[in-house]
Amino acid sequence: MGLLRIIRQKSSSMSSLCLGLLVSYFLCLSLNSRCTNEIDSNRLNEKVPEPHDDYEPRINLAGKPQRAKKVPQNLVRPRYYSTELGIKERLFMGVLTSESTVRSHAVAINKTSSHLVDKIMFFMDAGGAEKANVITLKLPGIVGFVDAQPHLKPFHMLKYLTDNFLEEYDFFFISKDSTYINADILSSLVKAISVSVDIHAGSLQVADSSPYCGLDGGILLSNSVLRKVQTSLDWCVKNSYSDFDDDNVGRCILHASQLPCVQIIGGNVLKNKKLNEYELQNLENLTFGDELAYYKLNDEKFFYKLHLSLSKKRLSETQAELQKLERSLELSDLSWPPGSYPPRRPKTRFDVIPWLHFDVQKAYLPSDFVNVQPLSGADLLDAQSAGIWISLQ
């Protein structure tokens, strides 16, 4: 009875559920029957679109590859740190020579000056260099110019210097091969000059009333002045109308740098001296001052004699300075080298350590009262051993 009562109570809900299932089933059948069963053959090769994902990475190949607007340049480091830091050598010396004097004057200048400057080179015409067979000469550098016009040779030298050595040297000294250069004074002078100062210096030609410095006495140029000359070389060549190289070169440098030639640099006077025939023949008796250049030397032997006399003068000055320093050390009671004990100085003659003279048998003057004394004991054995060793040697 209880079971029938429960079935009657649930019959209405069960019937409703079954009815809903039947209706949904027939509805699905009717919808599927309306869909076409035909498939378009043209759509068989189409890819099935992948599902869209906002986090899926995508590669955009449109307009690729693109070039950078500014290509970065590779940093090329120089081989030497001095090149990168702009450190230059101090002094370059250029000498104008010729076919007739390159084997005599040029060689003499090289032997007397090359060890005191950073670099020295000689300039001449190419034809003369070939005739003189300069290849056999042991010179550090000879440059030959195709243009053999004498009045243009200094400008060819200046152009060669500006093209090759502006980045290597701070100062340039140019002269002729008939001039002896006191390179020791020149080197000391250059070391005392700042590289930031424009220098156009030399010895003025007072006798010729010329406002320019002469190549006979030498011309000293700073790197900055030579850079200015580089841009005016064409003007210089066109206006080289004088018969003398000194005027042409001086006019060129003055036009390019707007600096007149001066004879005093930092309180130092650039002196030169023209030697006459009598002075050349008596160089040993000549009184030398602090001249930078001696010119009009017509024979190579005068270069060596002059160099010998100046070297002796410089040596005597150095020795006098050393003696002065020694006296100052003695007066100040300082030890030399620093940190060493000063030598023992005996106060009287009795404090002097005596010397004992001996041979293999006797000792001489062993005391103030004995002249000769025979050796005995260990002294005799030592003397005999020393005598045997000396005889074996």
Image (cartoon, rainbow, N blue to C red):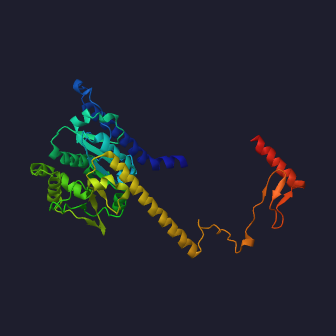
Picture quarter containing residue 259?
Answer: bottom left
Left or right, residue 323 beside residue 342:
left
Picture quarter containing residue 392?
Answer: top right
Left or right, residue 282 beside residue 359:
left
Residue at 43%, 45% in the rendered image: 14
Specify whether residue 3 is in view.
yes
Q: x%, y% of residue 222?
A: 27, 58
How many badges with numbers are in the image? Answer: 0
Q: x%, y% of residue 244?
A: 14, 51
Q: Nearer the viewer, residue 379 or 181?
A: 379
Q: Nearer the viewer, residue 4 or 188?
A: 188
Q: x%, y% of residue 280?
A: 31, 53
Residue most extreme to the right: 377
Q: Please say if 163 is above or below 202.
A: above
Q: Please say if 134 is above or below 299.
A: above
Q: Nearer the viewer, residue 74 or 309?
A: 309
Specify whether residue 58 is in view.
no
State which quarter of the image contains the C terminus. top right
Q: Please say if 262 is above or below 149.
A: below
Residue at 34%, 55% in the rendered image: 282
Q: x%, y% of residue 344?
A: 68, 69
Left or right, residue 15 beside residue 389:
left
